[in-house]
Image (tube, rainbow, N blue to C red):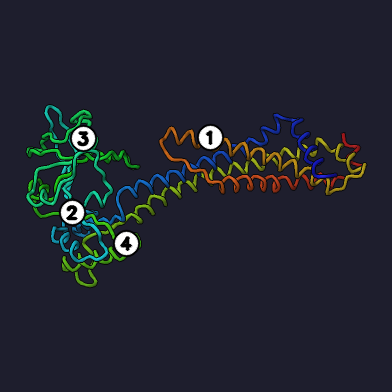
């Protein structure tokens, strides 16, 4: 018997019991659709996270104060006030692998414009901050070196502040009050939207760091230092320079721990993608169980089919069919069932992934290699779980098979 005849015969036997064949494929369809959808959404989420973290800045390095320790109890990162403007100045002058550096003084305050008011985060930064964090202006301008020098009361607003206080109108040139201090609005930032953590990146006001430090804070403490390495390949050297300079500035001797922490984009990306990657793998592993269940379903149905067609098998052997022909015949049926379920599962999974991605506002990435592997895996499931019934059919005694009722 030729391969074409095997396939035609297999298709005829499958279509003869359409409902049973569909129910047999259902486990494969559900399992594969789940795997495709979860992996596509997982890959898309990783891409979204990487894109979002990249938007935080160019070769971004963040220096944060360390933690306090009282009677053996640590207060957590940022609880120890140790960063100063002297640290920022020394880094700007001495670090060879740092392109930009800026202090960050963070204050929470009520912002008032006319009869409207809004509570938001005020950040005092240097003129280099937009380059470090990849901020762009939609209107007006950022503050200048002169504004930094004279502690000017000027502000650049995020889009959320504009919407809440000016109802979408151009606020450039308007006056606002931050706490009890009057400020002039000189610019509006381009919209960035929400982060993956749900934080509104547009709910922000930037002022000169000198203004925030001396007019709105204690005049000494720098909450964070933000820096940008000269290139991605120079990140490690830049971090080493920062560590060396700050340890010397803070008088930390060999053998003692740093009183600050340094983080970069690579660490953030690694942590975020590791979490999403692990979750995707776990969910995919659970979905793979459905594929195994589907494979067992195929084996079960094929065993039933062997029993039902015992007499037919005996006749085929009697008229010259070899045991290998019977084996191939049943294997092809199992593979066709499995592949059909796999193809339907792939298409269903892609549809579900794009549907959920649109509803959740998440990017969806369907890799061709994943589809090829999935379809190949379903074919392997068909062969693996179809072999035993096929072998059983090929081993039937033709005389007994023909007498079977």
Task: Please report contact status of discs 2 and 1: CB closer than 8 Å, yes or no.
Answer: no
Task: Please report contact status of discs 1 and 4: CB closer than 8 Å, yes or no.
Answer: no
Calculate the distance from the C-alpha at mark 2 to the C-alpha at mark 1: 48 Å
SS type, badge 1: helix
User: Considering depth in this image, is 378 or 5 the residue closer to the camera?
Assistant: 5
Tag 4 or tag 2, which sits nearer the N-term?
A: 2
Residue 46's x, y, as percent? Answer: 42, 47
User: Considering depth in this image, is 174 or 119 the residue closer to the camera?
Assistant: 174
Residue 350's x, y, as percent? Answer: 54, 38
Tag 3 or tag 1, which sits nearer the N-term?
A: 3
Residue 119's x, y, as percent? Answer: 17, 36
Residue indicated by mark 4: 235
SS type, badge 3: helix
Task: Please report contact status of discs 2 and 3: CB closer than 8 Å, yes or no.
Answer: no
Q: Residues within 10 Å of mark 4 (few under 14, many from 20)?
A: many
Q: Residues within 10 Å of mark 2 (few under 14, many from 20)?
A: many
Residue indicated by mark 3: 161
Quadrant hosting residue 156? top left
Task: Please report contact status of discs 2 and 4: CB closer than 8 Å, yes or no.
Answer: no
Q: In the drawing, does residue 250 fall left or right of residue 348?
A: left
């Amino acid at each position: 018997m030729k391969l074409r005849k095997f396939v035609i015969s297999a298709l005829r036997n499958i279509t003869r019991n359409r409902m049973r064949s569909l129910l047999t494929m259902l486990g494969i369809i559900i399992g594969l659709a789940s795997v495709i959808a979860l992996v596509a959404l997982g890959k898309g989420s990783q891409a979204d996270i990487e894109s979002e973290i990249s938007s935080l800045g160019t070769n971004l390095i963040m220096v944060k104060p360390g933690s306090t320790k009282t009677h053996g109890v640590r207060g957590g990162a940022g609880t120890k006030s140790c960063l100063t403007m002297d640290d920022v100045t020394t880094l700007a002058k001495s670090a060879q692998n740092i392109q930009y550096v800026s202090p960050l003084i963070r204050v929470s305050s009520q912002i008032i414009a006319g009869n409207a008011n809004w509570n938001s985060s005020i950040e005092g930064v240097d003129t280099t901050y937009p380059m470090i964090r990849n901020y762009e202006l939609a209107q007006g301008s950022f503050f200048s070196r002169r504004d930094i020098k004279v502690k000017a009361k000027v502000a650049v607003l995020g889009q959320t502040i504009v919407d809440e206080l000016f109802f979408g109108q151009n606020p450039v040139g308007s006056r606002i009050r931050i706490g009890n201090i009057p400020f002039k609005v000189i610019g509006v930032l381009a919209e960035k939207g929400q982060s993956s953590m749900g934080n509104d990146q547009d709910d922000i006001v930037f002022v000169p760091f000198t203004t925030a430090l001396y007019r709105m804070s204690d005049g000494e403490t720098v909450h964070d230092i933000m820096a940008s390495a000269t290139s991605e390949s120079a990140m490690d050297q830049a971090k080493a320079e920062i560590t060396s300079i700050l340890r010397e500035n803070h008088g930390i001797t060999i053998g003692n721990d740093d009183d600050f922490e340094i983080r970069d984009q690579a660490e953030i990306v690694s942590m975020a993608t590791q979490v999403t990657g692990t979750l995707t793998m776990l969910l995919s592993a659970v979905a793979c169980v459905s594929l195994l269940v589907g494979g067992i379903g195929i084996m079960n149905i094929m065993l039933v089919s062997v029993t039902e067609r015992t007499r037919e098998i005996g006749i085929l052997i009697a008229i010259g069919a070899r045991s290998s022909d019977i084996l191939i015949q049943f294997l092809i049926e199992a593979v066709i069932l499995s592949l059909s379920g796999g193809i339907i599962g792939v298409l269903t999974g892609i549809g579900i992934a794009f549907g959920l991605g649109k509803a959740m506002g998440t990017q969806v990435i369907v890799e061709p290699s994943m589809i090829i592997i999935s379809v190949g895996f379903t074919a392997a499931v068909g062969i693996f779980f179809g072999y035993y019934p096929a072998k059983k059919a090929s081993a039937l005694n033709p005389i007994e098979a023909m007498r079977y009722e």
